[in-house]
Image (cartoon, grey):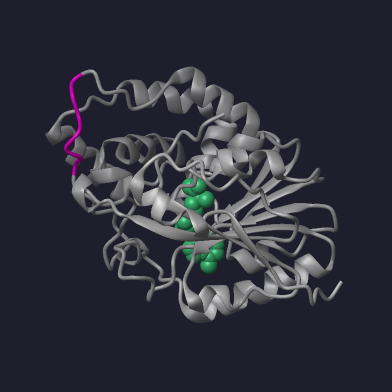
Amino acid sequence: MQPFLKWAGGKRWLIPKIKNSIPPFKTYFEPFLGSATLFFALEPKSAILSDTNPELIGCYRVIKNHCESMIKILKRLKITKSNYYTIREKFNSGNDPIKKAAYFIYLNKTCWNGLYRVNNLGKFNVPIGTHLQREYKVFDVDHLRAASRLLKRAIIKRCDFEEATKDVKSKDLIYFDPPYITTHLKNGFIKYNSVLFHQSDELRLAKVAEKLAKRGVQVILSNAAHPLIKQQYNGCFYKTEILRPSLIAGDPTKRTKFLELLVTSFPPPIEPIGNSKSPDEAISKDRRYKPFYNPKCRF
Ligand SMILES: C[S@@+](CC[C@H](N)C(=O)[O-])C[C@H]1O[C@@H](n2cnc3c(N)ncnc32)[C@H](O)[C@@H]1O
């Protein structure tokens, strides 16, 4: 199934490329949850899902445990400009977790580009989006109920990614999808992180990923194909570069394409070269789906 949230750095575009090559696994871990695209695509039997964003985690917990009460609140929220700013204010000042989850979904779907950005005081400050028409759909009841059923199979935690890996065992699957590092191409992503993900976090992540891969955990990691990232993953990993569109820019003319890095502890999916559909894909076709594998694997 599809995620019910929009999320900066969301991985809908990646799913068709990797879904069918994922090996069998026991428990699924997703420690940079965002909109949980891969969790919803895989529909695993058991999962441990986590993120450091408290409002995001609060929303998932409410959908898991109090979906119907939240839907009742969501149904009452009308899309108008003044209503948007009233709800944003209530979201920032309120404490009731069920109402906050409903406001979170409303704001996620009606704000500018589905962005989650907070000010220095931790208050959500994204303006209303420009795409809203009267019949715009903020949520789908059946979709939220299906998400709730699936989330009942998961433990949902608010924690740093490293803490989230403590219970991972051999034959489990873990998907790391961190925010882009600050230096990546000045592509506009970084300013949307309230707590920045630094190069030291990237190094910490690479160490954790390697430790898990050596223990026989199935590891998938996606990130920008930046030299600083690429050089961190050797030995145990396959590295594949994939061209992907950036959807974050408000102005569609500024939506350029970027090279993304897919790091896997198992052989990656390989699409035959020459299937490019547009000229700019053709230019980069020699870099798409080209796996790099360091044979000095330390298993
Ligand atoms: C690129 S997004 C994940 C997108 C997700 N894969 C999707 O498809 O929507 C990165 C997420 O990492 C979370 N995050 C940032 N720093 C973190 C940390 N140190 N530990 C865990 N999560 C973190 C952010 O809150 C954000 O939700």
Residue 138 occupies quadrant: top left
Q: Nearer the viewer, residue 238 or 150?
A: 238
Q: Quadrant of the N terminus?
A: top right
275 horizontally vs 100: left or right: right
In this rendering, the answer to whether 263 lies above or below 297 is: above
195 horizontally vs 1: left or right: left
Q: Quadrant of the C terminus?
A: bottom right
Name the magenta segment's main secondary structure. Answer: loop
In this rendering, the answer to whether 98 lies above or below 186 is: above
142 horizontally vs 184: left or right: right
Q: Which residues are magenta?
A: 128-134
Residue 233 occupies quadrant: bottom right
Numbered-mark total: 0
Q: Residue at x 37, y 41 (%)?
A: 104
Residue 13: x %, y % from top left:
48, 42
Residue 12: x %, y % from top left:
49, 41
Which residue, as the protein is rendered here, is positioned at the far front?
A: 274
Q: Residue at x 61, y 72 (%)?
A: 205
Q: Nearer the viewer, residue 276 or 154?
A: 276
Residue 55: x %, y % from top left:
44, 50
Q: Residue at x 44, y 66 (%)?
A: 180
Magenta residue check for 129: yes
**Residue 76 seen in the figure:** yes
Q: Residue at x 26, y 63 (%)?
A: 119
In this rendering, the answer to whether 33 lies above or below 294 is: above
Magenta residue check for 107: no
In this rendering, the answer to whether 263 lies above or below 134 is: below
Residue 4: x %, y % from top left:
46, 33
**Residue 251 seen in the figure:** no
